[in-house]
Image: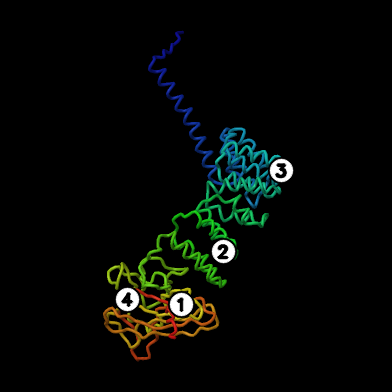
Amino acid sequence: MSQRRIHFTPRGVLLAAAIAATAFLSYFSIRDALADHDAELQTLQGYERATRLEPGDFRNWYLLGRYWQYNLENIDTARAIQAYTTALALNPRSAEAWADLATAQETEGNVAAAREAYLHAKHAYPLSADVSWRYGNFLLRQGEPDAAFTEMHNAVNVEPARGGEALSRALRVEPNIDLVLDRVLPPNVEAYLDAIRDQTADGHTANAVKVWNRLAALHSHLQLADTFALVDALLVEKQVPEAQRVWEQAVELSGFSHLPAPAGSVLWDGGFESNVIGGGFAWRFPAGLQGVQVSLDTHEKHSGNRALRLVFDGKHNLYLTGPCHEVVVQPSANYNFSAWVRTLSLTTDQGIRFQLRPIGTQDNSAVLTSDVHGSQPWTRIELPWSAGKSVQEMQVCVLRLTSQEDVGKIEGIAWVDDVGLVPVTAEPRKP
């Protein structure tokens, strides 16, 4: 009986090796894909299958640890620590895993282990804002404010948007805001602005002003709208001089200190040149009104580059109050109000006029200018106005009264420009 001999040619050997390699790679690729799929399910079963399929993959153990630590329905911190420990044995350079391990250790009451884990995290990623932030808060909880402030400063220095929260948390343990500002907030515009917004929203206006003073000292360019909340809060608290000071500093820092205006006018941006609206001592446009569109016009104006435009659609007998502007005035002082108005086919007997009234006092008496309607060229409107004894602030509003005509629906266009409120200098008495 003869035996067949199998001969392997070089080409056959290569083919067999290629098939084996392909099978080998396919096996591991499929296993990797299955592990990734299981992990992406974000379930306990999925994470556990992923660790069984790919036990050498750091990410699978880390995700399993986060599940045990942060799943509110199935928290098991001890298992989270075990998973993190396995993950870090595979990748000891993961600052995120060290920080999560530290949180878990602190939850279990093992403060020493938590501190050691945070130090490992800082060593793995010295510039991590998240690690510095979490370690700083850990140190606050341990009653170590000096070290905590250093870590929080490092975090805000990398991520200035943490400024507000850093200041708020630090003030809970150290009421001296000047000391906290020195230690926690770096001299950074974004960090200061975030702290101002946070303190203002919490009703701590005095703290917000302290931060503002440091921000103004940087002499950096700002957006004027960044001061709206603080200025408005100061006005609500009737701190009118302080609100005016903050506004004037912000106007200079935002590059609007030389806007054209009627000579001596105390009303800011009466010519609508800044394109800034919505708060502080800027124009405030009415919102949600039917029957009128309020905008700025760069084509039709009395002077400068812009004018206010109001377009009425002819469908409403509209009572309009606004746009409005708040102005700081001197008690018992006299002023001359003026504005330029143009109208085009503005219907009804009630056109565009202005209302001037004190605000912030019990005296709400208002005075009205004459109105402009029909089609009129640029027309100057003037009116004297006097502040009461206790009046520090007044309001100027564009006004349209409801018409009493049978057909009182207003249609047409009006433009407003060069609004001014100029103090009247008292003439010296004659001998």
Q: Which label's residue is closer to the chain start, 4 or 2?
A: 2
Helix, strand or loop for disc 4: strand
Instruction: State the SS at label 2.
Output: helix
- Residue at the extreme front of the image, as rendered: 431
Residue for badge 1:
395
* Residue type (three-letter) at the residue carrying disc 3: Val
Instruction: Report which quarter residue 367 is drawn in.
Output: bottom left
Mark with earlier residue (4, 3): 3
Query: Which residue is denoted by mark 4 in the rendering?
Result: 415
Eyeballing the image, is 375 above or below 417?
A: below
Q: Position of residue 158 (x, y in %)?
A: 53, 46
Q: Earlier in the sequence, mark 4 or mark 1?
A: 1
Residue 411 lies, in percent from the top left, at 31, 81
Pointer 4 with pointer 2, Cβ within 8 A? no
Q: Answer with mark 2 or mark 1, whichever residue precedes in sequence.
A: 2
On the picture, is 380 further left or further right than 78? left
Q: Residues within 10 Å of mark 2 (few under 14, many from 20)?
A: some
